[in-house]
Amino acid sequence: MKEKVQAALDQVRPNLQRDGGDVELVDVTEDGIVKVKLTGRCHGCPMSQMTLKMGIERFLKMNVPDVKAVESV
């Protein structure tokens, strides 16, 4: 599953990089929790939680059905 999540993040990454940010995969737990680290302009941005939940999490759930949630670490 980790490979599928990484492939999906690779599709999201260009959108984040366009705004000066990025996302790094930290871990995928057995129960479907994806842990990521927001970097660049995304780190500390007031909109980062919206980006995380409405953007990254939503996209991952559509492309990797075993994903239950995405958390920033």
Image (cartoon, grey):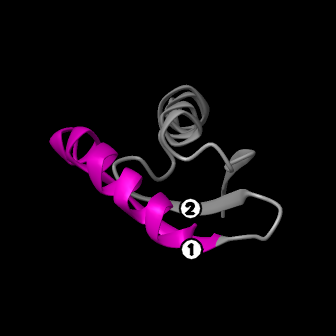
- Residue 61: percent from the left, percent from the top? 59, 38
Q: Is residue 2 located in the magenta-colored stretch of the structure?
A: yes
Mark 1 or mark 2, which is nearer the start of the sequence?
1
Q: List the residue tagged with mark 1.
A: 26
- Residue 44: percent from the left, percent from the top? 51, 48
Q: Find the residue positioned furthest to the right.
A: 31
- Asked if marks 2 and 1 touch (Cβ < 8 Å), the reply is yes
User: As rendered, which of 48 and 58 lies closer to the eye?
Assistant: 58
Residue depicted at 35% across the width and 60% down the height:
7
| Amino acid type of the residue tagged 2 in the rendering | Val
Q: Is residue 30 located in the magenta-colored stretch of the structure?
A: no
> In this picture, is 52 found above or below 25?
above
Quarter of the C terminus within the rendering: bottom right
Task: Tell me the SS state at disc 2.
Answer: strand
Residue depicted at 61% across the width and 33% down the height:
53
Q: Is residue 32 left or right of residue 34?
A: right
Q: Is residue 49 left or right of residue 23?
A: right
Residue depicted at 48% across the width and 35% down the height:
59
Start-end of magenta stretch:
1-27
- Residue 71: percent from the left, percent from the top? 69, 52
| Amino acid type of the residue tagged 1 in the rendering | Val
Q: CA distance from mark 2 to mark 1?
A: 5 Å
